[in-house]
Structures are given as structure tokens and as C-alpha cells.
Amino acid sequence: MICFEVQINGKVVCTAGVGDFGVLTSNLAWVHVHPARRGKNSGTNDLGDDLFLSVGGLTSNDKNEGEHLRWLNQQEIVPGDEIRIRILNQVICDEPVERFSEEEKKD
């Protein structure tokens, strides 16, 4: 299976894979909220500045009963960090730290 080996500053933080069918994603995001929009419900820190990395996926099967998987969920990143994603083809990967069905996601 295709796997993403994700490193932060030279340290492997996860090796993610969803199996033979599905979606595998890695997302690096920076959010800088305008001062007028900052507040306790904005989801950002006091400076209105967030930088984070997420790694997740969605399994797929012939019954359309996919499962959402997460290895990293908005892991904080800071300027100067080095992110490396190596694409591997291997049989095993790390277990996700979180998994849930589409039904559980709706709740």
C-alpha cells in the first residue's frame, strides 16, 4: 500500500496508510486571523496565528462503509520547522490515533 512517512525536524512522527482503497492526506496550514475577527470562538491562539500539520485518511470498500482515520490532528508547527513526507510502498503502517465512521462523524 502507499504510505506517507511524515517527519518533523528529522523525527518520524507517523507512517500513515489506508490500505488498498481510500484517500490519504497530509495538510500543512497557516491561519492568520484579522484582529477584528479574533475572539474566543475563532479557534486560533491569542495572536490569531496558527500553523499546523494534519495527517488523515478515509478507507474505502465495496459496501461504501468508509472509515475516517487520523494520525496527526492539527499538530502545532513553528517557523523554522522542517516537514518531510516520504512516499513509501509497504505492507504495514502505524495504527491511527483516531478512527470513526461516517455516522459517528455526523454526531
Image: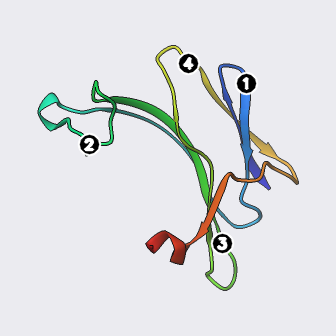
Q: Quadrant of residue 65?
A: bottom right
Residue designated by label 1: 11
Mark 1 in CB contact with mark 2 (< 8 angstroms): no
Residue annotated with mark 3? 60
Q: Which residue lies most toward the top here?
A: 80
* Percent x, y of residue 41: 25, 46
Whether residue 24 is visible to the viewer of this picture, yes or no, is: no
Which mark sits nearer the N-terminus, 2 or 3? 2
Asked whether 92 or 103 is in front, the reply is 103
CA–CA distance between discs 1 and 3?
30 Å
Rendered residue at 45%/73% (across/down): 107
What amino acid does circle 4 point to? Asp
Q: Examine the rendered structure and indicate whether residue 55 appears above or below residue 49.
A: below
Instruction: Say few, some or many: other residues with alpha carbon within 10 Å of mark 1 (under 14 / 14 to 19 / 20 or more).
Output: few
Marking on residue 81: 4
Precedes in sequence: disc 2 or disc 4: 2
Q: Secondary structure at mark 1?
A: strand
73 is higher (above) or lower (below) than 62: above
Q: Which residue position is annotated with label 2?
A: 42
Front of the two marks 2 and 4:
2
Contact check, label 1 and label 3, Cβ < 8 Å: no
Of labels 1 and 3, earlier in sequence is: 1
Using the numbered discs, state the Cα–Cα distance from disc 3 to disc 4 in whole angstroms.
Answer: 33 Å
* Residue 24 location (% of width, % of height): 63, 54
